[in-house]
Amino acid sequence: MCLLFSQVISDFDMTLTRFAHNSKRVPTTHNILDNRLLINEDCTKKLLNTYYPIEIDASRSAEEKLPLMVEWWTKVHELLIQQKIRKDTLARAVKESSAMLREGYKVFFDHLAEHQVPLLILSAGVGDVLEEVIRQNHVFHPNVHIISNYMDFDHTVEERKESYVNSFDIVLVKDETMDVPNAILRYITSSRDNK
Ligand SMILES: Nc1ccn([C@@H]2O[C@H](COP(=O)(O)O)[C@@H](O)[C@H]2O)c(=O)n1
């Protein structure tokens, strides 16, 4: 028998991650944010308690669930934006969480990478957190591709400073004047005038 995979498609939360460990629920990517970073975790917990039972309700059709799921993630995304989450806290939040991939995950990820089979992860969770979970488990191989919700962070000057310093000769911080450009102009024009 010959089995040929062109690619493997999987969702993430509770599929590649465990549902529970030692009788305790393993957090989804959203739960990791709720527990560690959100100032008011109640607001998203309330939404989870309302919408999760709908998600898993086998008596409802997909058509019936879809607008409610859209309503859920729209509300959660609005709340997340208000919380002003910082990118640099994500790795710590994941490290301190009880996020856990399923037993045997390493064989699964490594085997697909070794055989160059693309692994496409489609997730309604939070992509930035999902990536961090995979990275911290050392299985973020080049064949792993993710389609998910990503946060668009506001970058502080401090975060961008290094890349600016590497790219430009002069970097001005907190200078609201034209003193430096004027000095450069004076230098250029005076050296030209003195020729
Ligand atoms: N605010 C939310 C939104 C969704 N969830 C759960 O995350 C799951 C994402 O699952 P994937 O299989 O798409 O990775 C989704 O099924 C919801 O149960 C959440 O916890 N909080």
Image (spheres, helix red, strand yellow):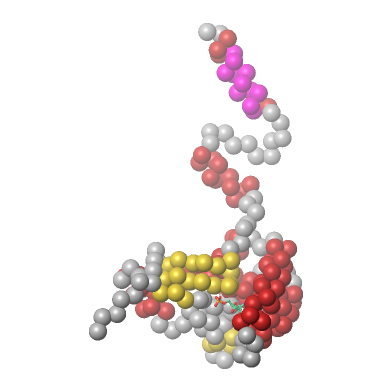
Query: Is residue 188 magenta-colored?
Result: yes
185 to 89, vertically: above or below: above
Residue 52 appears in the figure: no
Where's residue 143, x and y in %?
39, 66
Task: Looking at this view, name the residue that lies furthest to the top.
Answer: 195
Identity of the residue drawn at 51% across and 39% down: 167
Q: Quadrant of the N terminus?
A: bottom left
Identity of the residue drawn at 54% across and 45% down: 162
Identity of the residue drawn at 59% across and 88% down: 24
Task: Looking at this view, name the residue that lies furthest to the left.
Answer: 1
Location of residue 51 (image quadrant): bottom right
Identity of the residue drawn at 46% across and 82% down: 102
Provide the major secondary structure of the magenta segment: helix
Q: Quadrant of ligand 1?
A: bottom right
2 to 179, vertically: above or below: below
Q: Nearer the viewer, residue 144 or 140?
A: 144
Highlighted range, magenta: 180-190
Where's residue 91, x and y in %?
55, 66
95 to 164, vertically: above or below: below
Where's residue 50, x and y in %?
72, 82
Locate residue 64 relative to residue 111 in the image: left or right: right
